[in-house]
Amino acid sequence: MASTTINLPYNVGAIKVLDCRNFKPELNRNFVSVRPSIRVSNGRRGLIVRASETREGPIKKTGVSDEECEAAVVAGNAPEAPPVAPKPAAPAGTPEVPSLSISRRPRRNRRSPVLRAAFQETSLSPANFVYPLFIHEGEEDTPIGAMPGCYRLGWRHGLMEEVAKARDVGVNSIVLFPKVPDALKSPTGDEAYNENGLVPRTIRLLKDKYPDLVIYTDVALDPYSSDGHDGIVREDGVIMNDETVHQLCKQAVAQARAGADVVSPSDMMDGRVGALRAALDAEGFQHVSIMSYTAKYASSFYGPFREALDSNPRFGDKKTYQMNPANYREALVEAREDESEGADILLVKPGLPYLDIIRLLRDSSPLPIAAYQVSGEYSMIKAGGVLKMIDEERVMMESLMCLRRAGADIILTYFALQAARCLCGEKR
């Protein structure tokens, strides 16, 4: 007898692993077993299907041929099957009401974990993450107080270990942020384009060990400026635009020469994308991409990051070059300029408070969209988890999924390693 037996779990657990390539279903021993057996009725052989039997081994065949099975069915002796399960009872006191006269019931597509997974519109994978990493000249890893779980990593030791951990769970893109010694900072940020500086040295070391690692770099003067601003500061406090762009071009070329894959101007100076593209091309780096911080807002969510790099402005704020959080349409102006000047990726920063801006750029541009889940977002989730006010892991994953749903192709997030481990089914 040729037959097909299907064992179905009673309870299909919620599918946590969102990357289907790494999905490993758990074995559930509590299943319904369909077992054929022989019965004799009026001299004819037939089959009885018995349900609700737990069997660990394969079901034995009875030796009945296909022709005998078909003949039994034609003769009215079809195999017995379990009855349809009774409708679950409602709790006592539930009112009896007529069914609503509605043809569309969206809950039908949400009634089981399998259906919910089948119709899920947005996916999340480690490939969507870019892991921001802080580096410094020391050999020891220094904890960052305002960002639990984050460190200033020694560029020759701790960084290599952290990158290896990330690659093990599918995160193969990083972005570097340097903690520069105060003695190397200056009003014009010349250390930014020192080809033997911390960032170029680190890029060369990483590329030597991991040639396929995608390295993003930050293009801005604030880590190198004695004033703590993203550009050169005039004596009256004005941030000089064109002179700053000149310095940024030299910085981007130095990073590209060291092996950077993507340079990322975060300075918000006017015209810098076009100038960087021209400078890179002139030096033979046509293959190096530009991820522009297109809509970078003058946000209060950046505080922990500035502690990590010790890069707070010495005076004033950054409102004359970063965007007003109240503005929406202005993001389109910045996006159109960056796109026309040759940007390859458009980034929105911060992330979760600016989902509307992510969607705006997604709908208005064919370019890839990046979102930066910034330090303040990260630290709030961490703090809420420590205080048991929220489930840290669930909120982390939900926040990342929301950024993807809004339209982000990639997400710069300090949760990259932790979230990738969750997606791969590892424990924290």
Image: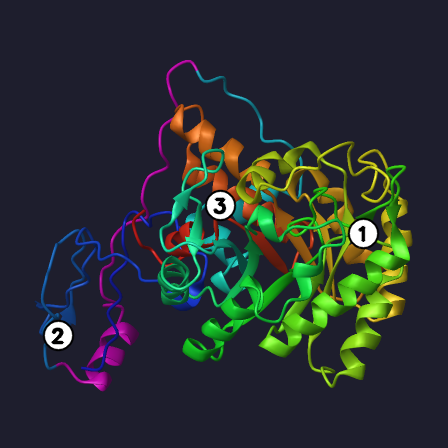
Neighbor class of circle 1 (other Cα within 10 Å; few <14, some 14-19, many 20+) is: many
Q: Nearer the viewer, mark 1 or mark 3?
A: 1
User: Picture coordinates of residue 264 (x, y %)?
Assistant: 69, 62
Residue that label 1 marks = 268
- In the shown orientation, is residue 96 left or right of residue 17? right
- Which quadrant, please, contains the N terminus? bottom left
- Residue range highlighted in magenta: 64-93
Q: Nearer the viewer, mark 1 or mark 2?
A: 1
Q: Is residue 87 magenta?
A: yes
How would you classify the magenta stretch by its main secondary structure? loop
Q: Amino acid at mark 2?
A: Arg
Residue that label 3 marks = 397
Q: Residues under labels 1 and 3: Cα distance? A: 30 Å
Whether the residues at callouts 1 and 3 have beta carbons within 8 Å, the answer is no
Q: Residue at x 91, y 53 (%)?
A: 333
Q: Amino acid at mark 1?
A: Met
Whether the residues at callouts 1 and 2 have beta carbons within 8 Å, the answer is no
User: Picture coordinates of residue 385 (x, y %)?
Assistant: 42, 30
SS class of the residue under badge 2? strand
Q: Amino acid at mark 3?
A: Met
Residue 277 figure quarter = bottom right
Residue 44 is tagged as 2
